[in-house]
Amino acid sequence: MSAEQIVFEAPEIMIDRPTHYCPGCHHGIAHRLVGEVLTEMGLVDDTLCVGSIGCSVFIYNYLNVDAVEAPHGRAPAVATGLKRARKDKFVFTYQGDGDLASIGMAEIIHAANRGERISVVFVNNTVYGMTGGQMAPTTLIGQKTTTCPGGRCADREGSPIRMSEIIGGLGGTAYCERASLDSVKNIRRAKKAIRKAFEVQQQGIGFGFVELLSGCPTNWRMDAVAANKRITEEMIPYFPLGVYKDVTAEGGCECSESKEDK
Amino acid sequence: MADNKRIFIKGNEAISRGAMAAGLKCYFGYPITPQNDIPEFLSTELPAAGGEFVQAESEVASANMLLGAAAGGARAMTTSSSPGVSLMQEAISYLAGSELPAVIVNINRGGPGLGDIGSSQGDYFQSTRGGGHGDYRTIVLAPGTCQEGYDMMIEAFDLAFKYRNPVLVLGDAIVGQMKEPVTPWVPEKINNYGAEDWCLSGAKGRDKRLLKSLFLEDGALASQNIHLQEKYAALQAEARADVFACDDAELVVVAFGSIGRIVKSSIRRLRAEGHKVGLVRPLTLYPFPANVLEDLAKQGKKFLTIEHNCGQMVEDVRLSVRKYGDSDFHGHMPGNLPGSDDFVEPILARLGR
C-alpha cells in the first residue's frame, strides 16, 4: 500500500484557514509568497505587519505574526512609527493600489524618501476591490469601472500612475521592483523580488518596495483565466516588469526599463 | 537634565521637558505656530537621549506614526496646533478604537479655519467630544501655567498607559509662548501598566497579537463599544479641578487653562475689594469635574463660565449644575488677548454689583 505523501507544505507562518478572497484573486498567492519569504529568512518570530484598508486588511488573519491596522493610506506612516519604536523587528506593510497610490500617496513617497527601514508589498490590480470596483489611480486607459463607466479617459481622469517608477527614483529607496502574479514564471520572480525588498531592510540599507501586478476577476467582470490574460496583455505593457532601483547591485543605483528580455 | 533646579523657560519647552521626564521615546510632528518650540527643542534633545525624532510630511502622517509607535509599546507623542490637530483626528479615533496609549499636545490657536496664531480655547469641543468619528473620548488635561505644562506631561503619559487611551494636553498660545520659572522633576518610577503584555514585539513563543479597530463579527463592535464606555465611566475617578476661594463665594467662576489663571488674578482683586467670588479651574476637561460643580450648586451658588471662545465648556458646566441651577457665560473672543482687567466687569455684572 502506498501512503499518500505530502510533498509541499504551507510555511509555518501561514494560518490554516480558508481565505475570504474571491476565486481567481491573487491576494492568496501574494500572502503565500510573503509567508514563504518570511519563513525562509527566519523572520517568523520577529515580524510586525501593518495591515491597510481594502480586501487585504485581513492579511492578519492569514499570517501568524503580530499586526496593527492602519487607516486608509497611512500604513507607511504607521510602519515608520512602529519601526522607530521596535528597531530590532522586521516591519512590513501590505497595501493595495487605492490605498497606496491614491489616498496614501504622500505617506508612501515620504517613507521611501526618508529611507525608512521598512518593506512595502504593493498589490496593484488597477481597481478598488472591497468598495465595489471603483476607479483607482492605476486603472488603465479605457478600463471600465463603476466610477468611470465609459472607460478611463486620460483627458478626464488623468493617466494611470506608475508607482515603481516613482518609488525607484527616490533617494531613500534601496530596492524597488515590479513583478507580476499572472504566470508560474512570474510568480517565481515575484518571490525573489519580495525577498530582495525584505533583505534590504534586514541589512539596514533602506526602504524596500515590491509591486505585484494582480488580478481582480470579480471587479474586472471576467473569469480567472481571462484575468491572468489581461495582466499579461494589457497591464504588463503599461507597467513594465523589472528592477527600478537596487542599491545592492554593482554600480549602485539602477533605474531600468524592463529587464524581462535580457 | 531635570535636576530639580528652577529654570526660566517657555511653556512649550516645559511641555517638551516634561515629556522627556515622562520617558518619551518617539516624537513625530509637523511645524505649525504657536507650538514650534516643541519640535525644535526635541529635534536635538530627544535623539541625544536615545529617542527618535521624525519631522513628518504632514500632521496626518505624524499622528499615524504615533499610532505605529504606540502599537510598539513606546512612550510616544505628537504636538500640533488647531488646524493640525483637526488633521490628526482620524488617527486619534483609530488610537481610541484600537486602545493604544498616546499623547497629543494641542497648543490651541484661533479658529475656525486658518484663524490666527493667537491664543484661543476654541478647540474645547473637538478635544472633549472625541473630535474624530465614532463613539470615543480622549482624556484631556488643561495646563494653565508652565509648571503645569511640565507636570501634566508626566501625568498624561501615566494616564495614557493606565487606560490604554489617547490623552490630549490642551494648552494654548498663552501657555505655550509665555516664560516662567519651572522646577523640573523626574518620576521615581515609570509605570507602563503591563504594556509588554499587549504591544507588538514579535510572536516568538506566544500567540500573535492583533491591534485593530475593525470588528465585523455580529456583536463584536457592540462589545468593544460597551467595553470602551465602561472605561470612560471608570475614568471619572481621574477628574480634577483647582478650587479657589469658593467656600463663602456667592458667585463661582468656572474657567480653564491660561484663562482660568488670568481669571484667578481678577478674583484675587475682587476678593481684596470684599466681593464674595471664587473660581473652579478644571484641570481635566475630560473627565469633567462635574461633582465639584454639582456640590457647589447644591449650596445655592451662582455660576459664571468664562472662556476664550464663543461658549463651549459652559455646556458641561450647565450639565454639571443642572439639578440645582444654571451658569451664565462670558466669552472673550479669540483674536483678542485678555488681561485680568477684562474679566472684572463681567464678574461684577453677574454678582449684581
Image (cartoon, coloured by chain):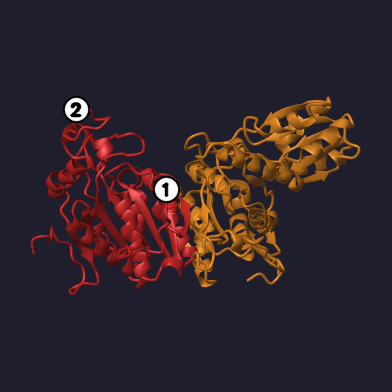
Asked if A186 appears above or below B321 in the picture, the reply is below
Give residue A205's position: percent from left, percent from top.
33, 71
Give residue A151's position: percent from left, percent from top.
18, 31
Residue B31 visible at all: no
Q: Nearer the viewer, residue A228 or B68?
A: A228
Q: Amino acid at mark 1?
A: Phe
**Mark sitting on residue A58:** 1
Residue B278 visible at all: yes
Chain B is which colour? orange
**Left or right placement of residue B279 versus residue A180 in this view:** right
Q: Residue at position x 91%, y 37% from top?
A: B248
**Left or right placement of residue B34 versus residue A144 in this view:** right
Tell me which chain appears red.
A
Tags 2 and 1 both on a single chain: yes
Give residue A131's position: percent from left, percent from top.
36, 35
The subunit carrying tag 2 is: A
**Left or right placement of residue B289 versus residue A256 in this view:** right
The subunit carrying tag 1 is: A
Asked if B336 appears above or below A25 in the picture, the reply is above
Asked if A195 appears above or below B163 in the picture, the reply is below
User: In which quadrant is the N terminus of chain B drawn?
Assistant: bottom right
Give residue B202's position: percent from left, percent from top.
49, 65
Q: Which residue is mark 2?
A: A150
Count of residue discs: 2
Q: Residue at position x 56%, y 45% from top?
A: B97
Q: Residue at position x 71%, y 28% from top?
A: B329
Neighbourhood count class around disc 2 (C-alpha, 10 Å): few under 14, some 14–19, many 20 upward:
few
**Quadrant hosting residue B303:** top right
Q: Amino acid at mark 2?
A: Gly
